[in-house]
Amino acid sequence: MTTSSRTPIVPASGMGFYVHVPFCKTKCPYCDFNTYQGIENLIDPFLPALTSEIECWGETLAHPAVKSVFFGGGTPSYLPPGYIEKILASIQESFQVAADAEITTEANPGDLDAAACASILSQGVNRLSIGVQSLDNNLLNLLGRRHQASEAIEAFQTARQAGFDNVNLDLMYGLPNQSMEQWQQTLDQLVGLAPEHISLYALTIEEGTPMHRWAEEGKIPEPDSDLAADMYQYARESLATAGYHHYEISNWSLPDRACDHNLVYWQNGPYLGVGPGAHSHLGDYRFWTVLSPRDYNTKASAWAESIVQPINELLESALKEVPTLGGWEHISVETACSETMFLGLRLLDGLDLSKASTLTGIDLAKKFQAPIQECIELGLLEQDGNCLKLTKPSYLIANQAFTRFLE
Protein backbone atom coordinates (compact mmCIF):
# COMPACT_ATOMS: atom_id res chain seq x y z
CA MET A 1 0.00 0.00 0.00
CA THR A 2 1.43 3.40 -0.92
CA THR A 3 0.86 6.67 0.83
CA SER A 4 -0.92 9.33 -1.21
CA SER A 5 -0.43 13.04 -0.70
CA ARG A 6 -3.54 13.91 -2.68
CA THR A 7 -5.11 15.69 0.28
CA PRO A 8 -3.33 17.71 3.01
CA ILE A 9 -3.69 16.07 6.41
CA VAL A 10 -5.35 19.19 7.84
CA PRO A 11 -5.88 22.26 5.62
CA ALA A 12 -5.26 25.78 6.90
CA SER A 13 -9.04 26.27 7.23
CA GLY A 14 -9.06 23.66 9.99
CA MET A 15 -10.95 20.49 10.81
CA GLY A 16 -13.88 19.31 12.86
CA PHE A 17 -13.19 17.69 16.23
CA TYR A 18 -15.50 15.00 17.64
CA VAL A 19 -15.43 13.70 21.22
CA HIS A 20 -17.28 10.44 21.84
CA VAL A 21 -18.65 9.94 25.34
CA PRO A 22 -19.76 6.28 25.63
CA PHE A 23 -21.63 6.53 28.93
CA CYS A 24 -25.40 6.50 29.42
CA LYS A 25 -27.48 6.22 32.56
CA THR A 26 -29.83 3.99 30.54
CA LYS A 27 -29.44 2.74 26.98
CA CYS A 28 -32.45 3.27 24.71
CA PRO A 29 -33.88 0.11 23.07
CA TYR A 30 -33.51 1.52 19.53
CA CYS A 31 -29.87 2.60 19.93
CA ASP A 32 -27.04 0.74 18.17
CA PHE A 33 -24.33 3.34 18.88
CA ASN A 34 -21.20 2.48 20.84
CA THR A 35 -22.74 3.38 24.19
CA TYR A 36 -23.05 1.60 27.53
CA GLN A 37 -24.95 1.75 30.78
CA GLY A 38 -23.74 0.44 34.12
CA ILE A 39 -20.03 1.18 33.60
CA GLU A 40 -19.78 4.28 35.75
CA ASN A 41 -16.61 2.85 37.31
CA LEU A 42 -14.85 3.66 34.01
CA ILE A 43 -15.81 7.35 34.01
CA ASP A 44 -13.01 8.56 36.29
CA PRO A 45 -10.19 6.84 34.33
CA PHE A 46 -11.86 7.96 31.07
CA LEU A 47 -10.95 11.62 31.63
CA PRO A 48 -7.14 11.20 31.84
CA ALA A 49 -7.25 8.63 29.04
CA LEU A 50 -9.19 11.00 26.78
CA THR A 51 -7.01 14.01 27.50
CA SER A 52 -3.95 11.83 26.87
CA GLU A 53 -5.29 10.83 23.45
CA ILE A 54 -6.08 14.46 22.66
CA GLU A 55 -2.59 15.59 23.63
CA CYS A 56 -0.93 12.79 21.66
CA TRP A 57 -2.94 13.61 18.53
CA GLY A 58 -2.02 17.27 18.97
CA GLU A 59 1.66 16.34 18.96
CA THR A 60 1.28 13.85 16.11
CA LEU A 61 -0.55 16.31 13.85
CA ALA A 62 1.62 19.30 14.86
CA HIS A 63 -1.22 21.25 16.52
CA PRO A 64 -3.47 22.02 13.53
CA ALA A 65 -6.47 24.35 13.40
CA VAL A 66 -9.91 23.26 14.66
CA LYS A 67 -13.08 25.03 13.53
CA SER A 68 -15.74 23.07 15.44
CA VAL A 69 -15.98 20.75 18.44
CA PHE A 70 -18.83 18.31 19.02
CA PHE A 71 -19.41 16.22 22.16
CA GLY A 72 -21.60 13.24 21.21
CA GLY A 73 -22.43 9.86 22.61
CA GLY A 74 -23.75 8.39 24.63
CA THR A 75 -24.74 11.20 26.94
CA PRO A 76 -22.10 13.92 27.41
CA SER A 77 -24.37 15.68 29.90
CA TYR A 78 -24.05 12.58 32.10
CA LEU A 79 -20.37 13.38 32.75
CA PRO A 80 -19.55 14.80 36.19
CA PRO A 81 -19.41 18.62 36.50
CA GLY A 82 -16.19 20.09 35.18
CA TYR A 83 -15.30 17.22 32.85
CA ILE A 84 -16.29 19.03 29.67
CA GLU A 85 -14.26 22.06 30.72
CA LYS A 86 -11.17 19.91 31.30
CA ILE A 87 -11.62 18.14 27.95
CA LEU A 88 -12.04 21.46 26.14
CA ALA A 89 -8.97 22.83 27.88
CA SER A 90 -6.99 19.86 26.61
CA ILE A 91 -8.24 20.43 23.07
CA GLN A 92 -7.42 24.14 23.23
CA GLU A 93 -3.93 23.45 24.56
CA SER A 94 -3.21 20.80 21.91
CA PHE A 95 -4.86 22.39 18.86
CA GLN A 96 -5.49 25.85 17.44
CA VAL A 97 -9.20 26.22 18.18
CA ALA A 98 -10.78 29.13 16.31
CA ALA A 99 -12.01 31.95 18.54
CA ASP A 100 -15.47 31.68 16.98
CA ALA A 101 -15.56 27.87 16.89
CA GLU A 102 -18.95 26.24 17.29
CA ILE A 103 -18.75 24.02 20.39
CA THR A 104 -21.71 21.67 20.75
CA THR A 105 -22.66 19.12 23.35
CA GLU A 106 -25.53 16.66 23.19
CA ALA A 107 -27.67 16.51 26.32
CA ASN A 108 -30.51 14.51 27.80
CA PRO A 109 -33.43 16.72 28.94
CA GLY A 110 -33.43 15.10 32.37
CA ASP A 111 -29.88 16.31 32.99
CA LEU A 112 -30.57 19.98 32.26
CA ASP A 113 -31.55 21.73 35.45
CA ALA A 114 -30.53 25.35 36.03
CA ALA A 115 -27.20 24.45 37.66
CA ALA A 116 -26.27 22.01 34.88
CA CYS A 117 -27.10 24.47 32.10
CA ALA A 118 -25.11 27.23 33.78
CA SER A 119 -22.21 24.84 34.28
CA ILE A 120 -22.18 23.60 30.67
CA LEU A 121 -22.28 27.17 29.36
CA SER A 122 -19.52 28.32 31.71
CA GLN A 123 -17.32 25.40 30.57
CA GLY A 124 -17.13 26.84 27.05
CA VAL A 125 -20.00 25.14 25.22
CA ASN A 126 -21.92 27.59 23.00
CA ARG A 127 -24.39 25.24 21.29
CA LEU A 128 -26.68 22.70 22.94
CA SER A 129 -28.32 19.73 21.20
CA ILE A 130 -31.18 18.31 23.27
CA GLY A 131 -32.51 14.81 22.59
CA VAL A 132 -36.25 15.47 22.87
CA GLN A 133 -37.32 12.65 20.45
CA SER A 134 -41.04 13.10 21.21
CA LEU A 135 -43.44 15.22 23.24
CA ASP A 136 -45.82 12.31 23.78
CA ASN A 137 -45.22 10.48 27.07
CA ASN A 138 -46.40 7.10 25.81
CA LEU A 139 -43.96 7.26 22.90
CA LEU A 140 -41.15 8.45 25.18
CA ASN A 141 -41.76 5.40 27.39
CA LEU A 142 -41.67 3.13 24.33
CA LEU A 143 -38.35 4.68 23.29
CA GLY A 144 -36.90 4.08 26.75
CA ARG A 145 -36.25 7.77 27.29
CA ARG A 146 -35.73 8.83 30.90
CA HIS A 147 -37.65 12.08 30.62
CA GLN A 148 -41.26 13.13 30.20
CA ALA A 149 -42.56 15.68 27.68
CA SER A 150 -42.87 18.41 30.30
CA GLU A 151 -39.21 17.89 31.29
CA ALA A 152 -38.09 18.32 27.68
CA ILE A 153 -39.89 21.64 27.39
CA GLU A 154 -38.60 22.73 30.78
CA ALA A 155 -35.04 21.76 29.80
CA PHE A 156 -35.21 23.97 26.71
CA GLN A 157 -36.58 26.90 28.70
CA THR A 158 -33.92 26.41 31.38
CA ALA A 159 -31.19 26.42 28.73
CA ARG A 160 -32.56 29.68 27.37
CA GLN A 161 -32.64 31.25 30.84
CA ALA A 162 -29.04 30.14 31.40
CA GLY A 163 -27.98 32.04 28.26
CA PHE A 164 -27.89 29.49 25.45
CA ASP A 165 -28.81 31.27 22.21
CA ASN A 166 -28.05 28.37 19.86
CA VAL A 167 -30.06 25.23 20.60
CA ASN A 168 -30.90 22.20 18.49
CA LEU A 169 -33.84 19.93 19.29
CA ASP A 170 -33.89 16.33 18.02
CA LEU A 171 -37.15 14.57 17.18
CA MET A 172 -37.98 11.11 15.85
CA TYR A 173 -40.92 10.15 13.63
CA GLY A 174 -42.27 6.98 12.11
CA LEU A 175 -42.41 5.42 15.57
CA PRO A 176 -44.42 2.27 16.38
CA ASN A 177 -48.03 3.24 17.14
CA GLN A 178 -47.34 6.93 16.45
CA SER A 179 -50.28 8.67 14.81
CA MET A 180 -50.19 11.65 12.49
CA GLU A 181 -52.07 13.64 15.12
CA GLN A 182 -49.40 12.88 17.73
CA TRP A 183 -46.69 13.95 15.30
CA GLN A 184 -48.43 17.18 14.39
CA GLN A 185 -48.96 18.09 18.03
CA THR A 186 -45.33 17.38 18.91
CA LEU A 187 -43.95 19.30 15.96
CA ASP A 188 -46.27 22.25 16.52
CA GLN A 189 -45.17 22.43 20.17
CA LEU A 190 -41.55 22.25 19.10
CA VAL A 191 -41.95 25.11 16.61
CA GLY A 192 -43.60 27.13 19.36
CA LEU A 193 -40.38 26.94 21.35
CA ALA A 194 -38.48 28.54 18.43
CA PRO A 195 -35.14 26.70 18.68
CA GLU A 196 -32.42 27.81 16.26
CA HIS A 197 -32.07 24.32 14.80
CA ILE A 198 -34.26 21.22 14.43
CA SER A 199 -33.19 17.69 13.46
CA LEU A 200 -35.83 15.12 12.48
CA TYR A 201 -34.99 11.43 12.07
CA ALA A 202 -37.17 8.57 10.92
CA LEU A 203 -36.87 5.56 13.22
CA THR A 204 -34.77 2.77 11.78
CA ILE A 205 -35.06 -0.47 13.73
CA GLU A 206 -31.49 -1.73 13.78
CA GLU A 207 -30.68 -5.42 13.98
CA GLY A 208 -29.39 -6.50 17.36
CA THR A 209 -31.30 -3.88 19.35
CA PRO A 210 -34.10 -4.71 21.82
CA MET A 211 -36.57 -2.91 19.58
CA HIS A 212 -35.63 -5.18 16.67
CA ARG A 213 -36.37 -8.19 18.84
CA TRP A 214 -39.71 -6.70 19.89
CA ALA A 215 -40.69 -6.22 16.25
CA GLU A 216 -39.71 -9.80 15.39
CA GLU A 217 -41.79 -11.09 18.32
CA GLY A 218 -44.78 -9.00 17.25
CA LYS A 219 -44.74 -6.85 20.38
CA ILE A 220 -44.55 -3.68 18.30
CA PRO A 221 -45.55 -3.07 14.68
CA GLU A 222 -42.99 -2.60 11.93
CA PRO A 223 -42.53 1.05 10.88
CA ASP A 224 -45.13 2.32 8.39
CA SER A 225 -43.04 3.91 5.62
CA ASP A 226 -46.04 5.59 3.97
CA LEU A 227 -47.10 7.23 7.24
CA ALA A 228 -43.51 8.27 7.91
CA ALA A 229 -43.40 9.92 4.48
CA ASP A 230 -46.58 11.85 5.29
CA MET A 231 -45.04 12.96 8.59
CA TYR A 232 -41.93 14.17 6.79
CA GLN A 233 -44.03 16.13 4.31
CA TYR A 234 -46.00 17.74 7.14
CA ALA A 235 -42.72 18.72 8.79
CA ARG A 236 -41.38 20.28 5.59
CA GLU A 237 -44.51 22.40 5.14
CA SER A 238 -44.85 23.34 8.81
CA LEU A 239 -41.22 24.30 9.31
CA ALA A 240 -41.09 26.30 6.09
CA THR A 241 -44.10 28.31 7.27
CA ALA A 242 -42.33 28.92 10.59
CA GLY A 243 -39.27 30.36 8.81
CA TYR A 244 -36.90 27.39 9.00
CA HIS A 245 -34.56 26.67 6.12
CA HIS A 246 -34.47 23.01 5.09
CA TYR A 247 -30.76 22.85 4.39
CA GLU A 248 -30.08 19.10 4.72
CA ILE A 249 -32.35 16.09 4.31
CA SER A 250 -32.95 15.72 8.06
CA ASN A 251 -32.06 19.21 9.29
CA TRP A 252 -33.67 22.63 9.45
CA SER A 253 -32.33 25.91 10.82
CA LEU A 254 -33.17 29.55 11.24
CA PRO A 255 -31.04 31.85 9.02
CA ASP A 256 -27.29 31.42 9.59
CA ARG A 257 -27.79 28.72 12.23
CA ALA A 258 -26.88 25.58 10.28
CA CYS A 259 -24.67 23.19 12.25
CA ASP A 260 -21.05 24.03 11.34
CA HIS A 261 -19.73 20.72 12.62
CA ASN A 262 -22.11 18.55 10.61
CA LEU A 263 -21.37 20.63 7.51
CA VAL A 264 -17.80 19.32 7.77
CA TYR A 265 -19.17 15.78 7.32
CA TRP A 266 -21.52 16.62 4.47
CA GLN A 267 -18.84 18.57 2.63
CA ASN A 268 -16.52 15.56 3.02
CA GLY A 269 -14.08 17.64 5.03
CA PRO A 270 -11.46 16.56 7.58
CA TYR A 271 -12.31 15.65 11.15
CA LEU A 272 -10.64 13.94 14.07
CA GLY A 273 -12.60 11.75 16.47
CA VAL A 274 -11.42 10.81 19.95
CA GLY A 275 -12.95 8.45 22.50
CA PRO A 276 -14.07 4.79 22.19
CA GLY A 277 -15.36 3.98 18.71
CA ALA A 278 -14.90 7.51 17.33
CA HIS A 279 -14.24 7.80 13.58
CA SER A 280 -11.85 10.17 11.81
CA HIS A 281 -11.19 11.33 8.26
CA LEU A 282 -7.85 13.04 7.66
CA GLY A 283 -6.01 13.33 4.37
CA ASP A 284 -6.59 10.18 2.37
CA TYR A 285 -7.35 8.02 5.39
CA ARG A 286 -10.30 6.96 7.48
CA PHE A 287 -9.66 5.42 10.90
CA TRP A 288 -11.44 4.60 14.15
CA THR A 289 -10.62 3.94 17.77
CA VAL A 290 -11.19 0.71 19.69
CA LEU A 291 -14.79 0.14 20.75
CA SER A 292 -14.32 -1.07 24.33
CA PRO A 293 -14.17 1.79 26.87
CA ARG A 294 -12.03 -0.37 29.14
CA ASP A 295 -9.53 -1.15 26.35
CA TYR A 296 -9.60 2.48 25.28
CA ASN A 297 -8.72 3.75 28.75
CA THR A 298 -5.74 1.37 28.90
CA LYS A 299 -4.44 2.04 25.38
CA ALA A 300 -4.87 5.82 25.51
CA SER A 301 -2.94 5.94 28.78
CA ALA A 302 -0.21 3.78 27.24
CA TRP A 303 0.09 6.14 24.26
CA ALA A 304 0.77 9.02 26.63
CA GLU A 305 3.84 7.17 27.91
CA SER A 306 5.36 6.73 24.44
CA ILE A 307 7.31 9.20 22.33
CA VAL A 308 5.10 11.01 19.84
CA GLN A 309 6.70 12.28 16.64
CA PRO A 310 5.04 15.05 14.57
CA ILE A 311 4.21 14.11 10.99
CA ASN A 312 3.80 16.02 7.77
CA GLU A 313 2.51 13.92 4.86
CA LEU A 314 3.16 10.33 5.94
CA LEU A 315 -0.03 9.79 7.91
CA GLU A 316 -0.08 6.07 7.13
CA SER A 317 3.18 5.46 8.98
CA ALA A 318 1.86 7.33 12.00
CA LEU A 319 -1.41 5.36 12.09
CA LYS A 320 0.56 2.15 12.48
CA GLU A 321 1.96 3.50 15.75
CA VAL A 322 -1.29 4.72 17.36
CA PRO A 323 -2.30 2.24 20.11
CA THR A 324 -5.90 3.46 20.44
CA LEU A 325 -6.87 2.62 16.85
CA GLY A 326 -9.27 -0.20 16.11
CA GLY A 327 -8.58 0.02 12.36
CA TRP A 328 -7.87 2.27 9.39
CA GLU A 329 -8.20 2.35 5.61
CA HIS A 330 -6.81 4.29 2.71
CA ILE A 331 -9.42 6.26 0.75
CA SER A 332 -8.91 5.82 -2.99
CA VAL A 333 -9.52 8.63 -5.47
CA GLU A 334 -12.59 6.75 -6.71
CA THR A 335 -14.04 6.51 -3.21
CA ALA A 336 -13.28 10.15 -2.45
CA CYS A 337 -15.12 11.24 -5.61
CA SER A 338 -18.15 9.07 -4.85
CA GLU A 339 -18.36 10.22 -1.23
CA THR A 340 -18.00 13.88 -2.19
CA MET A 341 -20.99 13.47 -4.52
CA PHE A 342 -23.46 11.68 -2.29
CA LEU A 343 -22.53 13.51 0.91
CA GLY A 344 -22.68 16.89 -0.81
CA LEU A 345 -26.05 16.11 -2.37
CA ARG A 346 -27.53 15.72 1.12
CA LEU A 347 -27.26 19.52 1.32
CA LEU A 348 -30.47 20.68 -0.29
CA ASP A 349 -29.13 23.99 -1.62
CA GLY A 350 -27.05 21.82 -3.90
CA LEU A 351 -23.54 20.64 -4.62
CA ASP A 352 -21.22 23.07 -6.41
CA LEU A 353 -19.57 20.75 -8.92
CA SER A 354 -16.76 23.20 -9.58
CA LYS A 355 -15.77 23.52 -5.91
CA ALA A 356 -16.18 19.78 -5.34
CA SER A 357 -13.95 19.08 -8.32
CA THR A 358 -11.27 21.33 -6.86
CA LEU A 359 -11.51 19.42 -3.56
CA THR A 360 -11.03 16.02 -5.20
CA GLY A 361 -8.72 17.08 -8.03
CA ILE A 362 -11.09 15.38 -10.50
CA ASP A 363 -13.65 16.91 -12.88
CA LEU A 364 -16.74 15.41 -11.23
CA ALA A 365 -19.15 16.70 -13.87
CA LYS A 366 -17.21 14.79 -16.50
CA LYS A 367 -16.49 11.73 -14.38
CA PHE A 368 -20.14 11.27 -13.38
CA GLN A 369 -21.72 12.60 -16.56
CA ALA A 370 -23.74 9.42 -17.18
CA PRO A 371 -25.24 8.97 -13.66
CA ILE A 372 -25.95 12.71 -13.41
CA GLN A 373 -27.87 12.63 -16.67
CA GLU A 374 -29.70 9.47 -15.65
CA CYS A 375 -30.76 11.04 -12.32
CA ILE A 376 -31.97 14.17 -14.09
CA GLU A 377 -34.04 12.12 -16.52
CA LEU A 378 -35.53 10.14 -13.61
CA GLY A 379 -36.48 13.34 -11.80
CA LEU A 380 -34.10 12.67 -8.90
CA LEU A 381 -31.73 15.58 -9.57
CA GLU A 382 -31.85 18.98 -11.21
CA GLN A 383 -28.96 21.09 -12.43
CA ASP A 384 -28.45 24.83 -12.83
CA GLY A 385 -24.97 25.56 -14.12
CA ASN A 386 -22.47 24.11 -11.65
CA CYS A 387 -25.16 23.53 -9.01
CA LEU A 388 -26.52 19.99 -8.81
CA LYS A 389 -29.23 19.20 -6.26
CA LEU A 390 -31.98 16.82 -5.29
CA THR A 391 -35.46 17.59 -6.54
CA LYS A 392 -37.99 18.07 -3.73
CA PRO A 393 -39.96 14.91 -4.58
CA SER A 394 -36.73 12.87 -4.25
CA TYR A 395 -35.85 13.87 -0.68
CA LEU A 396 -37.31 10.68 0.80
CA ILE A 397 -35.83 8.45 -1.90
CA ALA A 398 -32.47 10.19 -2.13
CA ASN A 399 -30.61 6.88 -1.88
CA GLN A 400 -31.84 6.09 -5.39
CA ALA A 401 -29.66 8.97 -6.55
CA PHE A 402 -26.77 8.40 -4.14
CA THR A 403 -26.21 4.77 -5.09
CA ARG A 404 -25.65 5.76 -8.72
CA PHE A 405 -22.42 7.51 -7.67
CA LEU A 406 -20.95 4.48 -5.94
CA GLU A 407 -18.27 2.66 -7.88
Image (cartoon, rainbow, N blue to C red):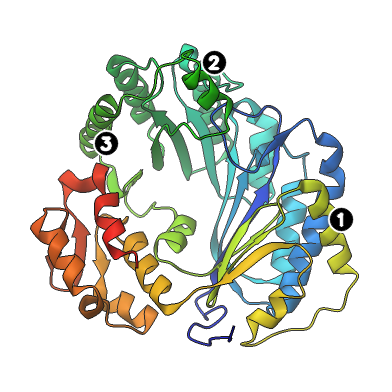
| Mark 2 or 3, closer to the camera | 2
Query: How many marks do you count on the picture?
Result: 3
Q: Which residue is mark 2?
A: 141
CA gap, disc 2 and disc 3: 26 Å
What residue is rendered at 26% in x and 54% in y? 348
What residue is rendered at 45% in x and 23% in y? 134
Q: Residue 153 location in percent, x, y?
A: 49, 23
Q: Amino acid at mark 2?
A: Asn
Q: Amino acid at mark 3?
A: Leu
Q: Residue 191 location in percent, x, y?
A: 34, 30
The kind of secondary structure element at disc 2 is: helix
The kind of secondary structure element at disc 1 is: helix
Counting residues from the start of the chain, the first of labels 2 and 1 encountered is 2
Q: Which residue is mark 3?
A: 239
Q: Which mark is residue 298?
A: 1
| Mark 1 or 3, closer to the camera | 1
What residue is rendered at 55% in x and 41% in y? 163
Q: Is residue 382 visible?
A: no
Q: Amino acid at mark 1?
A: Thr
Q: Residue 167 location in percent, x, y?
A: 48, 41
Q: Please tell me whether residue 289 is drawn above or below residue 338 in the rendered image.
A: above
